Amino acid sequence: MKFFKRVLCAAFAAILTSTTFVSCGKTVGSETGNSGESGQKPSFSWTKTKEIATTKTVGVGETVVFDVDFAIGSDNYVGLDAECDESVVGSFVIADADKSEPDFTEDFFIQKGDKGLFKQIIDFYFEHVYDKTVKAVKFKNVGANPATVNLKKIVSAEKEWYASSKIFINDKSVKLGIDMNAGGAINYLEYLKQKMQQVRMPDGSVKTGVNYANTQDDAEIMYESSNLINEMDRGRLVQQSYYGISKAPYDCAQYIGMPWPYNPVQGGDYTGTSSQIVDFEIEENRIYVKVRPLDWAKVKSITPSYMENIYTIENGVVKVENFFTDWSGYNHNSKRDQELPAFYGIISLGTLVTYRGEKPFTGDELSYYPSLGNWVGDGRAYWTDITENWVAWVNEDDFGVGLYTPNAERILTGKVGTDKFSSQLSKADATTYTALIPRLSLSSYETFSYEYYLAIGDVNSLRNKFNEMAKTCKNEDIIEWGKR
């Protein structure tokens, strides 16, 4: 039986590492041919419990150990009922129940002030496929004062996965998909009100638009519906990505011929390995995911950080709440352009539209950019005057996808590749890129949060939606962290 479980889980691990593979404030037949598991929430309850009821004190920078000897068997989900009056970096010490394999550890972070049960998926990459025992739980005090740690109990259960790695939610206007094999990043956005068709023109170019099979002369239909997000690799998608320290004690990797800084990326690393899912909740109209992101320029290097996302849709607008907690202990101490978020779209929506004037929210004239070049080359656009905080990538009918990040006025944007492609544009090398990029420094043991919004429509309707939202939507951390 143990051998069978090894083979089955090793096969699933290969999938994980494959390159193939609106309101403001906090809320707690398609191109893919896969409708996912939207709205089908597995039943769940904790199945094993062990009372600990032990309190220990720990000095600044010191570590305490709780011996728990908790047999979890094949369970892959562990919870800690613990109270800590300072932030702690912890680790589970996990043993093979048969004692034939060496112990391994899984790290975690509990922030000062966190309430409720801490939960973590164990052995996400299926590297330790055997019945397990949690031998001990360690807590290192990374706060400013001596701490008390009260470990009340430890629980475990089997966390069910879904039949598909792609999970969807939708309303009447928009369908949103995330990829659980890419850190829960957004890899799918579809317009539902009308058919957003991908067609091939006589000259070989590919276009995407509403009912284009009927409105474009001599158009050959390729797909009846279109995914408007480019998901060609783990670095694309729509996702969290941050830049931090680039000097000792951090060891920079070499990427595209240069030293690359600390760069946690939600989707995974440049080799195609997925980031580690720590926790998730899938509901009919809401998705929550928590990951430990990989360091982009390294090979399967899990960063000491958490990224959390809450996805919802309201009145045709996708709302994405983002939380980033770095617990590396690094003194990043340098402001960098941060991608809030990194957005990659299909090349057929190839004209960038935004407002760059001095009269925002007045209906003043928009700026159109149909011929942008590579964002890392001479053709890139780096502007600091996106005064309405939104951009849109549109087709020749001014119809496309809008991205709005309140309080973000800087932008890096561009596009690469050709519009001549024989398959789904969401899989193409050619892509558009946009990052609204406030300038700020990461900070260890603190949580940075912000929201962004996605919508589909014509430019004027997108602008009206975003400008109305601007009356109440604010990203306070973008403002406050930018002042540091």
Image (cartoon, helix red, strand yellow):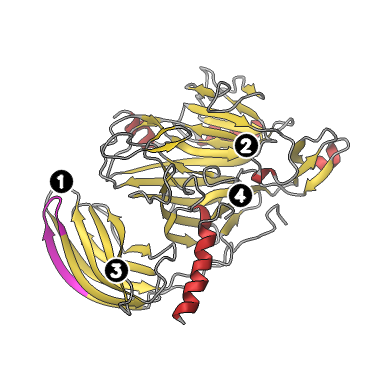
Q: Quadrant of the C terminus?
A: top left
Q: Secondary structure at mark 2?
A: strand
How much space separates mark 3 and mark 2, taking CA atoms? 44 Å
Instruction: Say which label, 3 or 2, has the lower sequence index.
Output: 3
Residue 445: horizontal and vertical position, in percent? 27, 46
Instruction: Say which label, 4 or 3, has the lower sequence index.
Output: 3
Residue receiving disc 3: 103
Examine the residues drawn in magenta and state their main secondary structure. Answer: strand
How much space separates mark 1 and mark 3, taking CA atoms? 31 Å
Amino acid identity at mark 1: Ala
Residue receiving disc 4: 188
Mark 3 surroundings: few (<14), some (14-19) or many (≥20) residues within 10 A: some
Identify the residue at horizontal 16%, vertical 58% (top origin).
Answer: 63
Residue 430: horizontal and vertical position, in percent? 65, 37
Mark 1 surroundings: few (<14), some (14-19) or many (≥20) residues within 10 A: few
Q: Secondary structure at mark 4?
A: strand
Residue receiving disc 1: 144
Disc 2 to disc 1: CB gap under 8 Å: no
